[in-house]
Each structure stands twice: as structure tokens, then as C-alpha cells.
Image (spheres, rainbow, N blue to C red):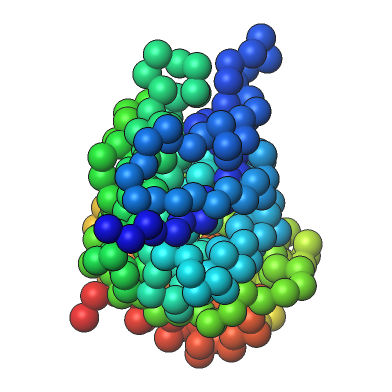
Amino acid sequence: MNTRQVVMITTGGTAASRTTQDGAVPVLTGADLLPPDLDHVSVQVVDLLNLDSSAMTVRDQFAVCVAIAEALDNDDVDGVVVTHGTDTLEETAFLADVFAVDPRPVVFTGAQYPSDDPMADGPANIAAALTLAAAEDNRGNGVQVALGGRVLPARGVFKLSTTALEAFDSVNENLPRPLVAETVPGGLPARVDLLALYPGVSPGLIAAAIAQRAAGIVLSATGSGNTHPDITAEVAQAHRRNVPVVVSTRVPYGEVEATYGGGGGGIDLVRAGAIFSPWLRAPQVRMALIALLSTGASRSEIEDFFAASQPS
């Protein structure tokens, strides 16, 4: 059997962490994380970052995407693994997927427990991810997430548990994969604010985001995409200022549909100019909108992306 070539990009996270008196902190390098025995797989390590994923910036997330593209510039590379903290893994993996034109496997993995914990799951997850990235029959599946014995597509994935080894689930494992662009854009990424909606929410949050020069806004709404009538008025104001507003939900499962009226229902929000995301949840919607705006997408292109992101 031929030896398969995999690049492993490390970014820190729990898999690289050890417990100190100040809590678990990432200290291990990629060389420390390599499994001792991987048959027919040769691994090149790229130590890119050493952060808790909750401390990542959007520029860091774009840097991960650039590093993936650089690894795949080498035709001898058969696949890529990214080790990443689980707090924001669903966002970075999704961002990578909207630029993933190359059919070779890209697999994100991480851990729920630090490397010195008796339940440390990083070694098994990393070994599984490397094997998956090296598999000859795993091409054309987009970016994947491999943790706790599960393999899920990046689109639609979300963190399900703070402690379970099976840390992630998917809102829908059969989502289409429209791309934003074939190359990762340079420059400063667009700023998009994600706002949680709840009873008594101040509608001034949207106006404040616009005043602070947010290029786009994502609303994590209640139910199937509903809120207070005062929010609807602010969405209309954002629309008049050409600031796109995309509506998702705080509910983990099910399709998001404009169904209700009453002034703050989904029907009202659409009439006010909001764009609905039927399946992608708010953290991934935000990354999509950042990617779209960073590549100069028009409103119609933004609408087309979210329309194309639901199964036919």
C-alpha cells in the first residue's frame, strides 16, 4: 500500500491543553499530538496557532482557511487535518467549507478533555481524523468534523454537549454545499454582528450595531424565526441602509420558515427586508455572511446562497 501524505494544521484547543493551577491551557505542539502508530500515513505538521478557540478572531479563522489552501497547493498532499478547540470549531470548519473547491479531504477534530485528563479523547480523535483525511475513497465530501467516533459534514454541524465525547450533532446532514469563492479573500474580513433575540430585547441593539459599522447582522430569533414588532421596525431601517439582516433561530433542530405574522413574526421580518436561513444556525450563518461580504457579494447573491443551502 502506498504511503498517504496528510498535512496536520494545529491551532491549540483542548487536545493541546494541559491542566495548570490557572486552568487548562494549550501548550502541546503538533509533534506532541501525533499518534505513535499510523500505518501508511505520513504526516507533515504545521503549527499555525496555539489558542483556545473561544479566543480566536475572525482573522485567525481566515488564517486557518489560508493554511488549508496552502497545504493543498502541494499535489502530493492527499488530505488535511485541522486540530481545533471545540468551542468555535463549527464556525471555522464551516468557513473553510465555503471555500473548499478542492475535492481532497479536510477534516477538523479536537477534544473535550485535556491531554492529561484520564478521559483524554484527543489522541483517538486525531488518529481517526488523520485516517479519514488519508482515505482514498473520501474525496468530494467537503469539510468534515470527526469527534467521538462520529463523522459529520461541516455544514449544519453544531456543538451539542460541553462534556460528552460525542460533542457534535447536525441540524441536517444532507445540506447542499454552495461555495462563496474558489479562493480565500485577503484583507480585513467584513464585520458581522450576531444578536440574540428574547422577550424584552432592546431593539436598539440593531441600531447600535449599524452605528458601530457592522457590515451585516445575524439574528438568532425565537421559534421558526420570530421576534417583537419593535425589532421588525429596526430590520426595516437596516434594510434601508443596505445592511443585510439574516434570520436564524436559537432552536437546534428543524427548518426555519417565515410562518407567523403579528408584527414580529417571520412574515413581517421578510417584508421588512430580512433574509431567512432555512437550515444553517446562527454561528454558521454569521460565518457565511462574513465570507459573502468579504468577497463583495451583492444582496441578491446573499439571498441566493441561503436559498441554495437547503435541500431540494
| Horizontal arrangement in the rendering, residue 44 relative to residue 238 (left or right) | left
> Is any part of residue 13 visible from this angle?
yes
Q: Is residue 161 visible?
A: no
> Is 161 displayed left or right of 16 in the figure?
left
Residue 121 vs residue 155, the one in the foreground: 121
Q: How many marks?
A: 0
Quarter of the image with the C terminus is: bottom left
Give percent across and percent down for residue 47. Answer: 65, 46
Q: Residue furthest top?
A: 21
**Residue at point 63% right, 81% down?**
295
Q: Residue 278, located in which quarter of the rendered image?
A: bottom left
| Residue at the spot 41% in from the left edge and 23% down from the top edge | 120
Seen from the viewer's position, the closer of residues 211 and 27 is: 27
Q: Is residue 36 above or below residue 238?
A: above
Q: Is residue 140 above or below residue 208?
A: below
Where does the image place residue 230, in percent across and percent down from the top left?
54, 61
Farthest-out residue, front: 1
- What is the quadrant of the N terminus in the image? bottom left
Tell which of 122 and 262 is nearer to you. Answer: 122
Front-most of residues 111 and 30:
30
Image position, residue 265 (x, y; %): 38, 65
Does 108 appear above or below 176?
above
Q: Is residue 292 left or right of residue 248?
A: right
Task: Name the residue located 58 percent from the left edge and 48 percent from the top edge.
Answer: 45
- Residue depicted at 32% across the width and 28% down the height: 164
Q: How far across and how far down the image is residue 269, in percent?
A: 45, 72
